[in-house]
């Protein structure tokens, strides 16, 4: 799998910004089928940082209704990436 298929996008949420500032961790959305080793390798190559640890979370898609018809949103997978001591990553600069 290509490294750009593994990491979809960084997530800019309140919780993500808080753990980034407090604990030197970044939050990204990843491919549902990727494992921790692939995520670590992809983040190190894309962002040019050293990764210490990767934790993953699978979020099941919600059931949505519109009138009588029911549908389902797709499942998502997030990764919380702990950077090594002394590493820093600024995804949004100038804010």
Image: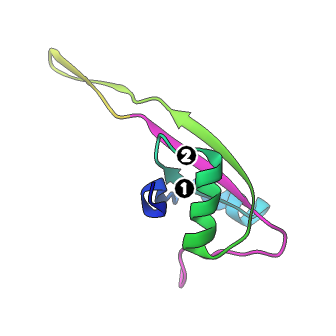
Residue 19 shows up from this direction: yes
Q: Which mark is residue 28?
A: 1
List x then y, in percent, for residue 85: 84, 69
Residue range corresponding to the magenta coloring: 75-95
At x 55%, y 46%, the residue is 78
List x then y, in percent, for residue 81: 67, 56
From the image, give the main secondary structure of the stretch colored magenta. Answer: loop
Q: Which mark is residue 78?
A: 2
Comes first in the chain, label 1 or label 2: 1
At x 52%, y 45%, the residue is 34
Work out whether residue 90 or residue 6 is closer to the camera in this orientation and state it. 6
At x 73%, y 69%, the residue is 50
Residue 93 falls left or right of residue 51: left
Give the CA distance from mark 1 to mark 2.
Answer: 6 Å
Relative height, residue 51 to residue 89 (above, below): above
Q: Is residue 85 part of the magenta span, yes or no? A: yes
Q: Is residue 78 part of the magenta span, yes or no? A: yes
Residue 36 falls left or right of residue 60: right
Q: Judging from the image, what secondary structure is the residue with disc 2 in? A: strand
């Amino acid at each position: 799998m290509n490294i750009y298929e593994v990491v979809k996008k960084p997530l800019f949420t309140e919780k993500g910004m808080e753990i980034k500032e407090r604990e030197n961790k970044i939050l990204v959305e990843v491919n549902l089928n990727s494992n921790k080793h692939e995520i670590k390798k992809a983040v190190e190559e894309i962002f040019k940082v050293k990764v210490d640890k990767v934790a993953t979370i699978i979020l099941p898609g919600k059931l949505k209704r519109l009138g009588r018809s029911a549908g389902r949103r797709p499942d998502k997978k997030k990764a919380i990436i702990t950077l090594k001591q002394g590493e820093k990553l600024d995804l949004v600069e100038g804010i």
